[in-house]
Amino acid sequence: MRILTRFVLRHFLPIFLLALAFFVMIIQLVDLFGNLVRYLNLEIPLLQILRVQLLFLPRSISYALPIALLFAVAFTLGTFYSNNELIAVFGAGVPLYRFTAPIVALGILLSLGVFFFHEHLVIDTYRRKNELSRELLNITRTFSNTDITVRGPAGQVIYSAEYYNDTTQQLSRVTVVERDGEGVFQRRINASTGRWNGTNWVWENGTDYRVLNNSPREGITAEPFHRIDDDRFGLHPRSFRRVARDIDEMPLEEAREWVSALRNAGQPFRRPLTDYYNRFSFALTPFIVALLSSSMGGRFRKNILLMSLLVSLVVTVVYYVTGMITGLMAGNGLIPPIAGAWTGVVVFTVLGVVLFRTAKT
């Protein structure tokens, strides 16, 4: 078996590395040509363009690796079959799953490597690449927001404002409603402005409405005020930002905190939560494609290069489209976010197992 393992890997690895380089180049060119006209119009220096592409390289590798793996496995096994080498292997009593076990094991190792590679290198370089691209192309990005309504972590304080200025961390024309633990109205503050002092909001120039003796039936008082500085209003300014952050640019811990902040503030969080779960499911893509391509190995003997490339692209597109559809369904609340992230992984894993069981050996 060790001889077969070395035999498979010796033929597979060179093809995989060449395919990886080829698909990385394709992805780099697609990104480059997508912005090339604007680069030329703005007369961006060549070194800056190369710097953008270099920062995009880790991301390109993470995108290209599953396609390259699928192509390399399909091409390698197709070549074995066309040379009648698989017939000899099967004739010796070695089943397909055992013959391709080194490739599947490599897919598992690559999945672990992709996860750490993505967390420790891809995220940082991708964020820097986007920042540099926006700077070179004069694309501005603001987190200021209009017509915002959010709630505090426990749901007892609700904030509503006409405008949030992210640069000055200031709210305009604010209404704050306080409720008790049972949701009964206790207090309302109408303020012209709210300023963040680093720990809590300071309300200025407005009216403070309070319930008498904690009972709305006994009446409500209204007192004008110039300034209210109360540490109970400590909802962080990021909760009022326009949701324009890309979770793909955040480290795992920051992404989890961002999703939690959106959930606590009552803002849409299903799509970001699905993207957060995708960070884990995407890492299993090399294992999925290794399983699928191994189970389909040797199903064609002619036009191996063309068929391997075609099968690689078709399976990859179907896999990613399935993830996109389930992600949209999760974002719209049709299915849970965790199902949106993991449905494709489960379905294609089962498909790979079924194809192994039906493979001719």
Image: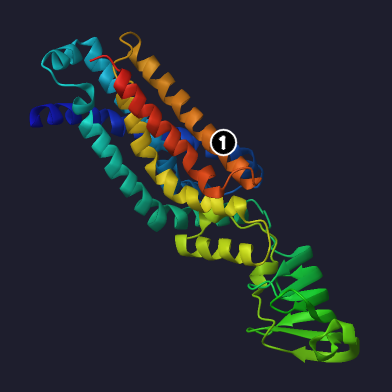
Q: Residue 110, how many percent across, how many down?
A: 30, 43
Residue 264, by quadrant, is bottom right
Residue for point 72% across, 79% down: 180
Out of 202 and 51, give the one closest to the viewer: 202
Up-down relation of residue 18 to residue 76 (above or below): below
Up-down relation of residue 132 to residue 218 (above or below): above
- Which residue appears farthest toward the top when viewing the image? 302
Q: Is residue 225 left or right of residue 198?
A: right
Instruction: State the quadrant of the C terminus.
Output: top left
Q: Which residue position is annotated with label 1?
A: 33
Residue for point 45% across, 30% down: 316
Q: Residue 214, how many percent across, how many down?
A: 79, 87
The secondary structure type at the circle numbered 1 is helix
Up-down relation of residue 45 to residue 223 (above or below): above
Out of 27 and 334, give the one closest to the viewer: 334
Q: Residue 251, how many percent across, how many down?
A: 47, 60
Q: Is residue 141 left or right of residue 309?
A: right
Instruction: Tell me the kind of residue under disc 1.
Output: Phe
